[in-house]
Image (cartoon, rainbow, N blue to C red):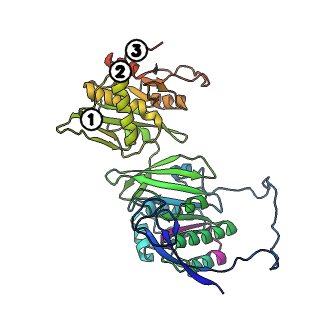
Amino acid sequence: MSKSKTSYVCQSCGAVHRLWAGKCDACGEWNSLQAEVAESGPPKGLGGGKKGKALDLVGLKMSDDKPVKRLVTGLDEFDRVTGGGLVPGCAILLGGDPGIGKSTLLLQSVCALAKKGLRCVYISGEEAVDQVRLRAARLGMADAPVALASATNVREIAATIEENPIDVLVIDSIQTMYVDTVESAPGTVTQVRTAAQELIRLTKKTGTATFFVGHVTKDGQIAGPRVLEHMVDTVLYFEGDRGHQFRILRTVKNRFGATDEIGVFEMGELGLTEVSNPSALFLSQRQPDVTGSAVFAGMEGTRPLLVEVQALVAPAPYGAPRRSVIGWDQNRLSMILAVLESRCGLMFSGSEVYLNMAGGIRISEPAADLAVAAALISALQGRPVPSEYVFFGEVGLSGEVRAVSQPDQRLKEAAKLGFTGGCVAERLSSQKKQAKIEGLTVHEIRHLDDLASLLREGGSTPRLRA
């Protein structure tokens, strides 16, 4: 006879503890342990019981009469992020801050698929059916043939999937779902893991493309066990600032396409609209001949993206100057400031430094080091950076500027938008020299001293180090 066993599971990291404690020893979170009851019994082996069913083995090569066809929504930015469309039987996890537009994005996507003749079902565990209808009417999609339901019981949802052929299923959200055989509250680690595992099993069995909406913690991570991100095929994050109209859909994991792809949307009264040329949009309000402004030519997956880097250096009224960053890594800013002081003789220790990636986008690429350094030097010296220049390159602790990947794509995007100059790291010997881009002057920077010389000379050819 099985016995019930009570354990305490951390709702942040999923660590299991025998006794309750105020702080989780695994992740350091306070008041995150909750009691969960599990049935325990003697282990059962495979021998002596019912014989399992043999697997149906198939070859690796796809059959010509049954090729895998992706489900294309028609939203180019969304299809780009998913790798060209949805693969039948895929499980996609979408996370993002509350109110950022996750439900709006998925509702627009399934409505576009439903209008193409696919059977789409939207199941909400947070809203009533009438509330979803009101949102669809506000977006102008009330006539889309999407089936709606409000449910949280996984057993009922599983019966619906098995009895009716469904092409696309949306679960909003996975934290509200529960399995009635598990004695835990909805949203706990055990319930989220069990519910997701059951729904993913049905997804693979029936070939239904399934979306899971996931809540996020205060740190921006998807709530629930970390194993949830390993179980699904694709993990998407919907990012943005409520103060800006731009929204970034970023791929973190994708088994059917490239990772680190982004799709750019603009939030308006009628929902989300695609931004086909995000570089031009991010630079549309840039003011020329302003100190502390430099343009970074970055890469997000396979897409080149130009972003304005803004820096401000102000006198510190008190003894401890502030260092404030929006859209970039705080520790990397401290490193760039230390390198500029130690290797280039520029003093920032007595000044407050503010750094901002304009447009509400977050940059994590190390190639932004050179653009940040250019903006800081310009803000400190009070001299504008040449407005027709772009910058990219990684900065080392000795002040050297290191080469980054895909320099040609970055420069081509800059030339397309009318830029006439670029400050880049010296190419590696393994990187092929490309023919000169018409109308674009490229300066290869070896050290931050060369960058400071270039900015002092106003864009003329700097004295490069030997």
Residues under labels 2 and 3: Cα distance? 9 Å
Q: How many marks?
A: 3
Compared with 165, 27 (above or below) is above
Residue at horizontal 49 percent and vertical 28 percent from the top: 411
Residue designated by label 3 = 462
Q: Is residue 122 left or right of residue 219?
A: right
Residue at horizontal 68 percent and vertical 56 percent from the top: 69
Q: Amino acid at mark 1?
A: Leu
Compared with 95, 445 (above or below) is above
Bounds of the magenta segment: 161-176
Snapshot quadrant of residue 271: bottom left
Snapshot quadrant of residue 363: top left
* Residue 263 x %, y %: 49, 48
Sequence-earlier tag: 3 or 1:
1
Q: Amino acid at mark 3?
A: Pro
Sequence-earlier tag: 2 or 3:
2
Compared with 455, 252 (above or below) is below
* Residue 379 x %, y %: 28, 29
* Residue 306 x %, y %: 43, 36
In the image, 328 versus 153, the foreground residue is 328
Residue 294 shows in this picture: no
- Residue 353 marker: none
Instruction: Provide the secondary structure element on which disc 1 rests.
Output: strand
Instruction: Provide the secondary structure element on which disc 3 rests.
Output: loop
Q: Amino acid at mark 2?
A: Ala
Sequence-earlier tag: 2 or 1:
1
Residue designated by label 1 = 312
Residues under labels 2 and 1: Cα distance? 17 Å
Snapshot quadrant of residue 429: top right
Residues under labels 3 and 1: Cα distance? 25 Å
Residue designated by label 2 = 452
